[in-house]
Amino acid sequence: MVIDERTFRVVGVHFGLRRTTVCLLDLRGQLLAETRLPHRRRGFEPLVAQAVEGIRELVSAAPGQVLGVGASTGGWVDRESGLVRDHRVLRWRDVPLRDALANGLGLRAEVDSSFRSLAMAERWFGGAQDVDDLVSLFVGNVVGAGFVLGGRVFRGFQAAAGTVDHLSVGATADESCSCGRHDCLHVAASDLAVLARARRAGLIGTRGTLEHLIQAARNGDVRADGLLVARAELVGVAAGALIDMLDPAMVVVSGGVVDAPEYLRSVQRGARAYLRDKRPVNTESVVRLSAFGTDGVAVSAASVILDRIYAAPSEFVPGLLELRYG
Ligand SMILES: [Zn+2]
């Protein structure tokens, strides 16, 4: 059976700290439409209600049959139970995201962490196609990693694989981590950490954003540039540790750390410095930028449902046994 790509669609929805992004894609992962829904509240019910309304509007405005919804968010997400077990920044604990979306929309829904969905998306339709051993490292307001090992997404015994918040990167942050230490990746190198540092140094105002800091660096502010370089190198240390541990063919970096792609070089330098004296790795070829740009988390959320559709198409379209593209 040949797929008519104009017919079938999937929805991706990503819940972030400041906005929810919903998008409509075809079965090849091509983005057809996208809506950003800014929010200030972090409560589970209001954010799901907002997302359901946004998805309904997006779907009703476009032709095609929607096969399902893939949802992602940072933190600890368990695909099997459909629960967000813990989201440190949104402060969600054991919330039934999958069922809330499925019930609200009358569509099949699947959830996973945004870090895993990024890894899946890179492999299905990004820059890591045919790569069997892959790490996706996201550093933004939240931090996390997704692993594809031996061609399969690795979730771990409790679906908590990829929690790298507390990976020691050797730098001493001003703030202490929730675990009490000062050298964890999250407190040393997240967007929140670098922005707090920039505010204290007077480089941006109290409402200043990462875009403001990047702009200041591009306008020649050496202190702003220095902060961003130092943060990127710490992310590189984390990448180096993951390379040392898992020996992936590729580490794909995304999130605020590479909102300005020029800082990829600093990430590679940090990884090289970590791996020096351990083993030779061509970090320029292994450590790469995500194919999905700054908003990859939303597009990649769709890969959570596409992964299911590719694995068992007949569950979604009766009579359809295999999806073939080429
Ligand atoms: Zn910690």
Image (cartoon, rainbow, N blue to C red):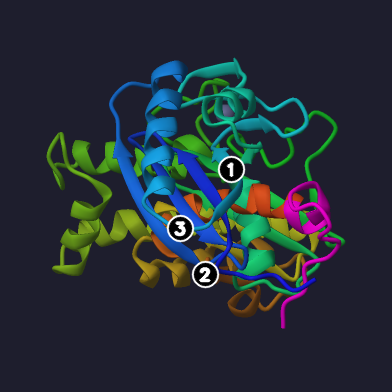
Tell me the kind of residue under disc 1.
Val
Label 3 element class? loop
Instruction: Name the front one of labels 1 and 3.
Output: 3
Indicate the secondary structure of the residue bearing disc 1. strand
Q: Position of residue 79 (x, y in %)?
A: 72, 34
* Magenta part, dominant SS: loop
Is residue 172 at all visible to an observer of this figure?
no
What stretch of residues is rendered in magenta? Answer: 309-326
Label 3 beta carbon less than 8 Å to ligand 1: no
Residue 298 vs residue 111: left or right? left
Q: Position of residue 324 (x, y in %)?
A: 77, 74
Quadrant occupied by the N terminus: bottom right
Disc 1 target residue: 69
Contact (Cβ within 8 Å) of mark 1 with mark 3: no
For marks 1 and 3, the one nearer the N-term is 3
Tell me which label, 1 or 2, sits earlier in the chain. Answer: 1
Q: Nearer the viewer, mark 3 or mark 2?
A: 3
Q: Nearer the viewer, residue 20 or 317?
A: 317
Q: Quadrant of the C terminus?
A: bottom right
Residue at which label 3 appears: 63
